[in-house]
Image: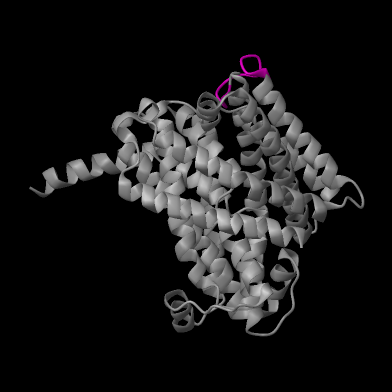
Amino acid sequence: MLRSFKGPRMASLILFLSIMGPGIITATVDNDAGGITTYSLAGANFGYTLLWTFIPMLVALAVVQEMGVRMGVVSGKGLADLIREKVGVKITFFVMIALLVANFGNTLAEFSGIAVSTGMFGIPKYIALPVAALFVWGLVIKGNYRSVEKIFIGASLVYLSYIIAGLLAHPNWGLALHSVAVPQIDMSAAYITMVIGLVGTTIAPWMQFYLQSSVVEKGISIKDLKYSKIDAIVGPAFTCIVAFFIVLACASTIFSNGVVVNDVGDVSRALLPLAGQYASGLFALGFLNASLFAAVILPLSTAYYVCESLGLETGISKSFREAPVFHGLYLGIIVLAAIVIMLPNIPLLPILYLSQVANGILLPFILIFMLLIINDRSIMGEYVNSRIFNYIAWATVIIVIGLSLGLVATSFM
């Protein structure tokens, strides 16, 4: 009896492990250089008071990722392909150009994060950035989808370092749980801006394109859709837990001791006397991993949606000869981003702000396109959204649109 019970359970677990990847990887990369900086400053400047935001963050990210996974599995097409079919070539072209600009700005942020994190370990950026660019390029050009995905999942596990760092900081668990259960709303401009930054960075336009394209390239079938949906939910859950512990670590040490910090480098150095060398080292290691990880995924996302928009061959498993534009664009973005960050006195802050503004403007359009497509029976058949799910999804979209508009407004201000 016990053996027959374990058999199906074990088979389901093995099947899930073979399907998982796209949802976990996409959500985890959301904790990139910009995200970790935002979480760190939220904890350092506001203590435990912003921990409640991770509840709506989890719901929003899980809802959007589930739709992306379902669209990819059912249609067998990437999001850019479906948008082109739904709204035409002209609108898709303008979206593609805007996403290309926004993603390049985001990629600059990741290479900037590599420069900052390697600097914490005493490595000059003029050495670190060329080596990182070569590694990022070689990882994709020499591998296939399956091998690269395994490396990505391994990189996702490095984010556990933030959970360990949070535990080493000895947080006040009672206060932390109270802050989650009972939101403490402050109407100050700084507090509202930070809330917008936290929740607004949860969903980025590039994520929807990468997630759906990776689902398609992995070849997940409809009969395995339920496992892919679990993957789409497990990813956001892990991401929010990691972000929660980043805020926790900074709140229980830096905020509690009144230390002033301005960036992740300051945070790592501040943790050294407050939480010990292991917490400080783990925090720096996590930031390096996050920046390097995202420096691979963001250019990949760009290459996917540009080539899909133009009807060209895409895929990590394709050779340079089979998909020259895909691989050429991936390489070009990496090289150009590394060169720009190595330039002296580069005005990085305005570039990063503009990329965030572009993300904020584009995201509502991408989410609306997704909802139009997922409710189209000619594309999705019986897998369209249910009425209840549509209510949840549209509510999520409206909230995200409001936050995105707020993020754009605060960026201009």
In front here: 53 or 389? 389
- Say how many tags the image has: 0
Q: Residue at x 74, y 47 (%)?
A: 111
- Direction bottom: furthest residue: 257
Decide: is 89 above or below 278.
above
Does residue 160 belong to the magenta stretch? no
Q: Nearer the viewer, residue 408 or 33?
A: 408
Q: How is the image coloured?
A: one colour
Horizontal side of 412 relative to 201 (left or right) equals right
Dividing the image into 4 quarters, which one contains the C terminus? bottom right
Q: Is residue 83 left or right of residue 328?
A: left
Residue 26 seen: yes
User: Mostly what secondary structure, the magenta segment?
Assistant: loop
The quadrant in which residue 379 appears is: top left
Q: Which residues are magenta?
A: 314-324
The residue lying toward the viewer, choosing from 133 and 47, is 47
